[in-house]
Amino acid sequence: MAVPEGPTDKRYTGNGVTKIFTIPFLLLAATDLDVYIDGIEISSGFAITNVGNPTSTITFTVAPVDQADIYLQLNVPFERLNDYQENGDFLSSTVNRDFDRIWQALKQLFRWSTRSLRLGNFDVDGAGWYRAKGNGIRDLKDPVDPQDAVTRKWSLVFLGDLISAIQGPINNALNIFYRAPDLTAHVVQDLSGADGASLIGDGTGSVKDTTNALVWRDVELQDDIDVAKLLADTGNFGKNIMLAKARARIDAGAPFMHVLGDSISHGAFADDWYRNGWVNLFKRMLNVELGTYSYGVTPLLPFTNPVTGASNADIHDVLIGAYWFLYDALTDVPTGASYVTATASAQIDITVPTFQDVAVIYYAQNPSGGSFEVLINGTPLTTINTNAATRNPFVGCGFVLTDNGLGSCKITIRTTSTAEVEITGIGYYKTANQAVLQNMSQSGRKLINTSQACVQKLMGESALFVMALGVNDLYDHQNDDVKFAAFTQVIDWLIQYANQYEVPVVVPDFVWYVGPENRTRAQLRRLATQTKGVYIPFPDFFMKNSVVPNSAYLIETLNLFTNDLHPNVAGHKLIAETIAKKIGLSISSKKQVLDYHDWWFPLALNPASGVTNKSTSAPFTSAIKNQGGQTLVRLNLTGLAGAVTKGVALGFPSRAEVQFDIPVITQLTPTNAGVSQGVCIFNSAGVSVITNAQNATADHELFFSVPRS
C-alpha cells in the first residue's frame, strides 16, 4: 500500500479514563511501535488493532493516570527480511511490504534528523550556526581548544578560579571614575541605578535611547502581529489548530460536530446519499481522524431526484404514515424539520441495517404534549410521554439497535394519544455520546429560520460547527433589507456563541452565481473571520478571469452539477475532499475513505432460507466491508443443522458497493476431529451454504476475504 507523508510519533496526555488512542501513522507490524508512559518504555498492558492501515488504535488494559505523558513512536528495525530468488515469485504483496518498510525507515530517519542539531538553511558550513530550536544540550565534553563549547560546570569552575586570583576586597569599587556618553562624571555603581541605561553608550546615543525606540517600533508592529496571528489560526498553519480545538471541545464534554445545511447537505442528487453525499464522506474522514465509528443524526426525509425520479434515501428507509405533517420552519428545532400529529395510532416506520449499536429518537417536549410508543421489530419497547411544563425541541430516547435476524432493525414510532406529538430526528451511534458529525440539514432550509436558543444549544454541544446555509437565504432576501437584517442577526449569534464556547467554525460557501462582493457571501466570510474559522469560497473556484459562470458551464462543461443549484456525485466528492484538506484531516480522499474506512454493512439474509443471524447485536451480525483490494466477509449464522443447501443471501446490498470477478468457495469450520462440515459459496448470486452429513452444529461462524474487481 502507499505510505502517506505525516508523523512517525504521537504524544497524548492521559486523563485517568481514556484507554483508546489513535496511532496516526502506518504500522506494518505491531512490534514496530514503541510505547512510553512518563518516559518509561512498556511492552505489555495494551493491545494494538488495525495494524497495516494508515491509522491504527492502541487500547490500554488500564487507562493511563491523569496527566500521564503517553508517547507512541514508530521504530522500524533496520533489517531486510526477504531474499528474492532468481526466477522466483515476485508477488506485489511481498514487494509492496518490502518497499513500505524502507519508506517507514526513511520517515523514521527523517524524524531523527529533525530532532538533531542542524545548521540554519542559509548558513554556510564552517561559518554558520547550529540551531537547537530552544532546546538545551546535554552530555557536552569540557572545552579544550579556544573555539570549543563551554559547559555550565566548567564556566563555574573558571569563574571561581578567576575570583580567587583577585587581590584585596571584592566589589570595593566606590571610587572608580566613569564618564557617561554625555561626558558627565559618575562612578561605576551608577550603572546599576534606575537610570543606568542612559549612562551606557550605544552608537550615536545611549542604550536607553535604543530601548525607547524599540518600544515604539513594537507598538507600530502590533497590527502586523495581529494579522499574522489570524493567518496562523486560519491558514495552512491553522489546520492543526482547528483539529486541536475540536479535540479540546470533545475532551470538555461536547462530542458532537454539526452541519447546518440545506438540500445540498441533505444529499440532493448524490445518487446513493449514503456513499456519495458530501456530509457522509466528510463524516467518514472525521471518524478516521478521531478513531470513532458512529453515524449520528441524519435527515428523516428522503430526497427524490426530480430528473430520474429515484428516491435518494440515506442509510435508513423511512415510511411516514398518514396524519403526520412536516413543519420545516420551526426556528428552535436543530434538524430544521419536525413531523407533527395529533392523531392516535399515527405511525412512522424506520428500517435500518443493523450497523450501529444504539439508535436515538429525538422528539419535542411541549405543554399538553401527547405520548408515543417505540416498537423494535414489532415488539413494544417503551412509551414516551412528551408532556412538559416548557418546550424542549430536541430530547433523545436511546435504545439498543436489535437485529431482526436478517440484518436489519425495524423501528416503529406509534402515537398512543390524541394530544400533539412532534418527532424531530433520529441518529445512530456506536455508543451514546461518541464523537460524530450530526447532519442537521433539511431541503429548503434557510438560516433566517434559526432562533438564538437553537444557535446556543448547537454551539454549546459542538466540537466543530459547519455552517453550510446561505443559498436559499440569498434568493429570499436579495431585495429585502428586513430579511437581510434578520439573516445578519443569526450570523451575529453564531459568532457570539462560537467565540463563547471556543468552537472551531467551517463555512463552505454554496452561494452560486454571485461574486465575492455580494452581501450574503460577505456575511458568510465575516462568520469565518470573526470566529477565526475556515471560509471556503466554492463559487470562486469556478470563476474564470473573475467572471461569475452560468449554470451551463457548471453542468455541461465542468460536469460537477445536476442542475443550477445542486452538485452531482462528482461535485459532492469535490466538496468533501476540499473541506477535509482545508482543516487538515489525514484522510481527504473519497476513494481511500470508502475503500479502507467504511462501516461494516449487514447482509440482507434470505428469510425463506430459515437461516438467521446467531446474534442480535450489531458487531456480530453477518456483514461485508471493503478493505483495499479485498472485500471482507463476516458470517455468524444459525439454522444450518444437518446436511442442507441454503441460499443465505440473495445478492448484496447496493450501498455496500461489492464488486468482484472471481467466485470464492471456502470451507466451513471443521469438526473438532478436523472433518469438513461443508462449504460456503460466495458468488454473484449471493452467499450460499452447503453442509454435509458430518455437519454437527446448526451454528456456523466464518470470516474470509474476496478479491475485489
Image (cartoon, rainbow, N blue to C red):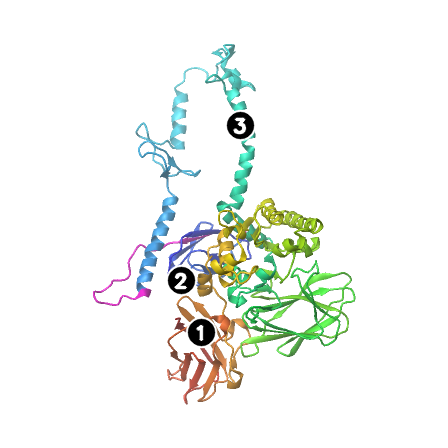
Instruction: Say whether residue 61 is left or right of residue 254.
Output: left
* Label 1 SS: strand
x, y percent for residue 170: 46, 18
Residue type pointed to by label 1: Val
x, y percent for residue 706: 40, 73
Gap in angstroms between the C-alphas marked 3 and 1: 68 Å
Q: Quadrant of the N terminus?
A: bottom left
> To which residue does mark 2 refer?
52
Residue type pointed to by label 2: Gly
> 672 above or below 265?
below
Q: Quadrant of the C terminus?
A: bottom left
Within-10-Å neighbours for mark 3: few <14, some 14–19, many 20+: few
Q: Which residues are magenta?
A: 66-93
> To which residue does mark 3 refer?
217
Gap in angstroms between the C-alphas marked 2 and 3: 54 Å
> To which residue does mark 1 refer?
633
